[in-house]
Amino acid sequence: MGMWVLAIGGSGGDLAERAAALAAATGTSVYEAQRQLISRGPRVLATHGDRGAAERAAEAIAAAGFTPIVLDDTACRLARFEVRAFALEGRTFKVTDRRGASVQLPFAEIAVLVRGVRTIGPDDREPFLEVHGAATPVLTLCERHLQYDGLHLERQPTAAANFARLVARLRGQAPQASYDERLNTRAGQLQVLGERLTPEADLEIATLLLARTLQRMRPAA
């Protein structure tokens, strides 16, 4: 059974006033609302078993002056392209996955870069970067799963150094893209996922929430 995630975007203004409004809209205490608003957002507020309930809750939050975000948990996990190899050619970022499928994304169309660290074992974590563009799936680049031949003469002796170099190259080629690295820490991940979800199981939701919020904050072209 699917899950619908309800979150709010970035917050600002008087905390007491906003907490009172959020408490009234969600039927919670002012204290709990303050806890939800203390971070800069986005933040997961609730999860629902059906879309209708999530959308009704979102309407109440919007009427109270907040910016709601509703995400389909299943879609969050499927809308990703796991990159294996890449090329930085001209004005385009070209990538392929393990099966040989390919995607081409012009650097000028990269909207958001989300950097973080994911848990892949009891005592093992791996850095990743997600590349968000308007007309492509989310490109997921994981430090140890990439082939770094696309760096050519810039290739470094370790995966960590290669990954850092690739991130720097993408930021340089797409200066218009919003960049966020708060998911590098567990504390940052928990700030986004709130008290309902966990980084171990739901990190894809955190990255997509950040990307949606940052895209809304970008100035119109």
Image (cartoon, rainbow, N blue to C red):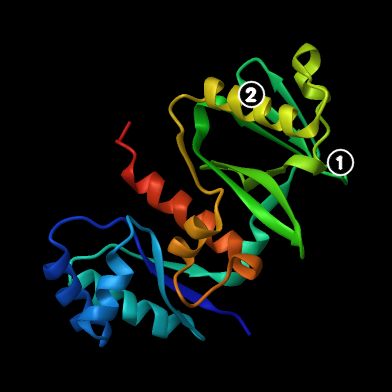
Identify the image quadrant of residue 94: top right
Name the residue at 32% across, 70% down: 36
Q: Amino acid at mark 2?
A: Thr
Judging depth in this view, the residue of 142 and 72 nearest the camera is 142
Disc ID at residue 100:
1
Identify the image quadrant of residue 218: top left
Quadrant the C terminus occupies? top left
Residue 75: % across, % down: 60, 65
- Secondary structure type for disc 2: strand
The residue lying furthest to the top in this view is 153
Q: Residues within 10 Å of mark 2 (few under 14, many from 20)?
A: some
Q: Measured along the vertical axis of the image, is residue 188 above or below residue 83?
A: below
Q: Amino acid at mark 1?
A: Gly
Name the residue at 35% across, 48% down: 216
Q: Measured along the vertical axis of the image, is residue 100 above or below residue 174?
A: below
Residue 87: % across, % down: 74, 24
Residue 168: % across, % down: 59, 25
Name the residue at 45% across, 62% down: 192
Number of marks in the image? 2
Comes first in the chain, label 2 or label 1: 2
Residue on which disc 2 sits: 92
Identify the image quadrant of residue 115: top right
Q: What's the distance in space between the residues labelled 2 and 1, CA to CA?
A: 18 Å
